[in-house]
Image (cartoon, grey):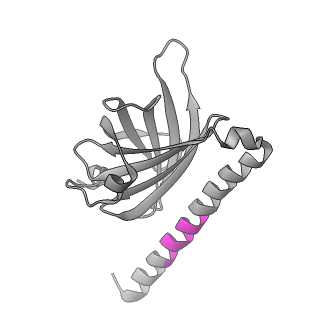
Amino acid sequence: MSNQHRLAATSSISRMATVAALGAAALMAGAGSAGATDLGQTKTTYISLDGYCDVLVLTVFPWHQAGESHSCGGGNFAVGSGMEGKVTGVYPKDLTIGETYFQDATSTYLWNIQYPLASGQTWSIFKSTDGVNFSVVASGTYTIVGATAARSPRAGQPVHSAVQN
């Protein structure tokens, strides 16, 4: 790949990061219609994907929307937004979050994370290149960790690497 192509790819990733950040900001701006007391019920939780280096920072708002920031080894590489929901007849609820992964601008990723958040619950991630057809990338269990542990380097490969193998 030529330097010009690398520069163009880097620029494209930067634009996608900006768009994703603006989308997350818009999600949080929706909080403007919620009362100040509602914002006090917003909860941020750090979950570590067992067997991977990934840590997701999940923020759940009292009006059932959720935001996500995704890192591995201290570097942020994805953001997403979605909502808390329940499928009739299925327990528990889940967080369904669409994610922009900055190193794969041609795909959409979708997380399903069992909710309420508790260590030992399950997660799964799906990938789509057309926004309609999704295939499973990986799944497993997660552990709740503190903010300090979330920022520490973690052993293992990123969950997105399962797509590349």
Residue occupying the point 42% across, 54% down: 70
Q: Nearer the viewer, residue 104 or 34?
A: 34
Residue occupying the point 55% across, 15% down: 88
The N terminus sits in image quarter: bottom left
126 inside magenta stretch: no
On the image, the x and y values in percent for residue 74 come to: 34, 64
Residue 165 appears left or right of 55:
left
Q: Nearer the viewer, residue 51 or 144?
A: 144
Read off the magenta span.
11-19
Q: Is residue 17 above or below residue 111?
A: below
Q: Nearer the viewer, residue 28 or 17?
A: 28
Residue occupying the point 41% across, 49% down: 56
What secondary structure is the stretch in magenta mostly built from?
A: helix
On the image, the x and y values in percent for residue 38 come to: 70, 38
15 inside magenta stretch: yes
Farthest top residue in view? 89
Q: Is residue 19 above or below residue 162?
A: below
Q: Nearer the viewer, residue 38 or 13?
A: 38
